[in-house]
Image (cartoon, rainbow, N blue to C red):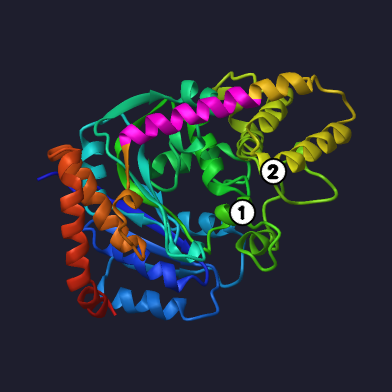
Amino acid sequence: MDFELKISVIIPTRQRPDTLEHCLKTVTAQKYHNLDIIVSDNFSEDHTDKLIRSYQQKDSRIKYLNTGKRVSMSHNWEFALSHVKDGWVTIIGDDDALLPSAISRVSSIIQNNNNVYAVQSSLCKYSWPSLNSNRNSYFTVPIKKGYEIRDCKKWLLKVMNGTASYDQLPMLYQGGFVRMDIINKLKKEDAKGIFYKSMIPDVYSAIALALFLDKYLYLYEPLAINGASHHSTGTSHFKNKNTYNSPVQKFYSEGNIPIHKSLQLECTKEFKESLQVMVYESYLQATFLHYRKNLKINMNKQLNLALISAKDQHYDEVEKWVNLILEKHGIKLNLLQSNTLKMLRIFYKTKQILFIINTFFNTRGINLFDMELSNVYEASIVAKTIWMSENKYGYSRIRKILYKTKSLFAKNYNTLSNKSK
């Protein structure tokens, strides 16, 4: 039996007991003893504390923290991270999940790769029914197995050039595990001794770790679920940003770390609807680490990439923001001509379509089987079933196994829920 490494799972939360309960179930279900489950409560004013303490009574691995006052997302994550002293650490959202045996699996992988300081896995993607007015939620599960050792500079360049997503980097978030001594070394590099330098903590962690490390292990096998619920700040940012009292409006109302001065505007303290802008902002916030990788990233290219990659419904807003940034700096950057931009946007969309096709052959979608999953706890069990069945039996038997799993849920899920209360 493998030696049990010390591993900490941080769950930042704030007034989301409806999703937190199912997230906690997936973590407490891990049959791994040397595990700390740190729930960092951002001063919730509902029954979140009672829910956590009810789980704490049954599982001594749970540690409950409370910020004592309302703080920003990055400050809550920093607060929670300060309570981890050694071992390995990961962070998951309170509407996300770990797959069964994820902790044991990553522990084994780490022990078989001595010179690796960060592990990032692929992710399942689950849409909570609460996100939509109907109950048709999507759920995808990567089915590929194995892993590769990746060069940080190579993959960071891909992300900065817009050809890869930031979650392909060694991120301290869903499916990402990092040695705590690396986090502590990064803190020492910063003048203020903090880890998070941007209001978007997951993106920043990916950029900072990729700048600091030489390599990392990328695991094709999923270890976690990225859950999108009506609480999700990221989903709200791109879907209902202007809705009153939406998660993203609450996010921006807090004492956030200011956007990097190069991208700040007097008229707004908010990000535009562009992941590339968020990536670039995190890169700018990590200036103190730039000496470790000579990437030669310039504003001109990043602004062009923001326009090229902007979704149609967000393009006008992103273009307006780009022009305001140009005006702010009082310079005329070499922006691409409109015709060239149109051609590059078509090329970019074509690449996205090819990516979707490639993803189709390496993932399985639950909607194909018309199977309702009401929460991430159910989704985590089904995801593990799919991955194991696919790698053992192949696609032809998955439908039958899924229906058997659904039948088991119908008989046993209420019993499991009652026992956990």
Quickly name the residue at label 2: 314
In the structure shown, which secondary structural element does the residue marked by tag 1 occupy?
Answer: helix
Q: Is residue 144 left or right of residue 84?
A: left
Asked whether residue 417 is in view, the answer is yes
What is the crowding at mark 1: few (fewer than 14 residues within 10 Å), some, or many (at least 20)?
A: some
* Residue sitting nearer the eye, 77 or 277: 277
Report the quarter where the C terminus lies.
Answer: bottom left
Q: Let me know if residue 32 appears in the view.
A: no
Q: How many marks?
A: 2
Taking the image as shown, residue 218 lies to the left or right of residue 301, namely left
Q: What range is drawn magenta here? A: 345-362
Which comes before the other along the chain, label 1 or label 2?
1
- The CA span between labels 1 and 2 is 10 Å
**Which image quarter: residue 30?**
bottom left
Residue 127 x, y percent position in the rendering: 44, 56
* Residue in the foreground of this view, choosing between 62 and 26: 26
Q: Main secondary structure of the magenta part?
A: helix
The answer to whether residue 84 is above or below residue 118 is below
Position of 241 with respect to 264 (left or right) is: left
CA neighbours of label 2 inside 10 A, class few (<14), some (14 to 19), many (20+): some
Quick check: 305 above or below 110?
A: above
In the rendered structure, which amino acid carries the disc numbered 1? Lys
Give the residue at x 83% y 34%.
323
Q: Which residue is mark 1?
A: 239
For the N terminus, which image quadrant? top left
Residue 258: x, y in percent? 72, 49
Where residue 270 appears, x then y in whole percent?
72, 51
